[in-house]
Amino acid sequence: MFKPIRVKPLPNYRLWIEYDDGVAGEVDLSHLAGKGVFALWNDYAAFERVYIGDRGAIAWTEEIEICPDAVYMKIVRLPAEPIRWCAPQPDRDRAERRPHSTWC
């Protein structure tokens, strides 16, 4: 797993992220803005409250986060699944002690 150590919001729903291995770069999340749980970002100040969660996810609330691995792959331009919604899977989430759904 790639571990983000710094995250900074940028204009137009972009983030600058630095990882513990020295990789750093920008990712554009504008395609998520206003959709599903990301309707929260309709208030741009909510987007700017991004932080790194306890388990290393890039988060805005305990319920809204994106997978740092997918973002890392995007930054280094390696093939990866697009950043998208992972539907809640109660059995898996409970088994992995994940109390909420994530974006990955």
Image (spheres, helix red, strand yellow):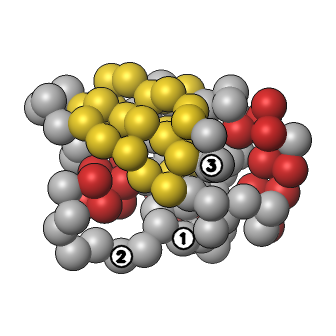
Kindly identify the residue that appears in the image at 23 percent across and 43 percent down. Answer: 2
Q: Mark 3 belongs to which amino acid?
A: Tyr
- Tag shown at residue 81: 2
Q: Are marks 2 and 1 in contact (CB under 8 Å)?
A: yes
Relative image position of residue 1 (x, y in whole percent): 22, 46
Q: Give the residue type at disc 2.
A: Glu
For label 3, the SS is loop
Q: CA distance from mark 3 to mark 1?
A: 15 Å
Residue where numbered disc 3 is placed: 13
In the rendered image, residue 55, in percent from the top left (x then y), is placed at 42, 33
User: Does any portion of residue 18 appear in the rendered image?
Assistant: yes
Which of the 4 image quadrants contains residue 81? bottom left
**Which residue is rendered at x = 80% and y = 31% of the image?**
45
Query: Disc 2 to disc 1, how far (Cα)?
Result: 8 Å
Looking at the image, which is closer to me, 78 or 100?
78
Measuring 18% from the left and 37% from the top, which residue is drawn there? 23
Quadrant hosting residue 24: top left
Q: Residue 40 location in percent, x, y?
A: 83, 48
Circle on res. 84: 1
Q: Is residue 98 visible?
A: no
Left or right, 96 with respect to 41, comes to left
